[in-house]
Image (cartoon, rainbow, N blue to C red):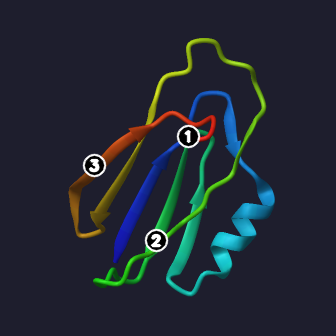
Amino acid sequence: MVIVEVSLLSGFVLAPRFRMLLERKTIVKKLEVKPDVVYLYLEELTDESQTFILQLEQVIPVKNLKPASIKVYDYYQPGGLKIPSYSGLGS
């Protein structure tokens, strides 16, 4: 099992309708949403490219917004591959 861990930008939450869209993707076995992070549990990763779109909604205005991170790792061997940070606002 593979986990995609998406840290949310401060003051943002996952848009509810996008939660449903992610849950419908056949590769996503489980979706766990916490206040500051979203976990996508995937049965496996293949050499086929996968795209996940997470639309966030700003619920609290935050000044000097800092980048957040995305990590991909094997459930049984945490540590994983860190993907460059994202900052939102069209990123």
**Label 2 belongs to which residue?**
41
Q: Residue flagged by tag 3: what amino acid is it?
A: Lys
Horizontally, residue 38 falls left or right of residue 72, namely right
Measured from the top left, where is residue 79 in percent x and y? 21, 53
Residue 37 in picture, x, y percent from top left? 53, 46
* Nearer-the-camera pick, 77 or 47: 47
Crowding at dot 2, Cα within 10 Å, few <14 / some 14-19 / many 20+, comes out as many
Please state which amino acid type lies under the numbered disc 2: Tyr
Q: Residue furthest top?
A: 63
Q: How many marks?
A: 3
Decide: is 62 above or below 32.
above
Q: Sequence order check: which comes first, mark 2 or mark 3? A: 2
Q: Which mark is residue 82?
A: 3
* Residue 8: mark: 1
Residue 25 in the figure: left or right of residue 82: right
CA–CA distance between discs 2 and 3? 16 Å
Quick one: SS at disc 2? strand
Query: x%, y% of residue 56?
Result: 69, 45
At label 1, counting other C-alpha atoms closer than 10 Å, the crowd grade (few under 14, some 14-19, many 20 or more) is many
Q: Label 1 amino acid?
A: Leu
Residue at point 50% right, 59% down?
39
Q: From the top left corner, tell me how far across and down residue 52 is, in percent.
A: 54, 66
Which mark is first along the chain, 1 or 2? 1
Q: Residue at point 23% right, 56% down?
A: 80
For marks 1 and 3 on the same chain, the one whose residue lies earlier in the sequence: 1
User: In this image, 60 relative to 22: left or right?
Assistant: right
| Tag nearer the camera, 2 or 3 | 3
Frontmost of labels 2 and 1 is 1
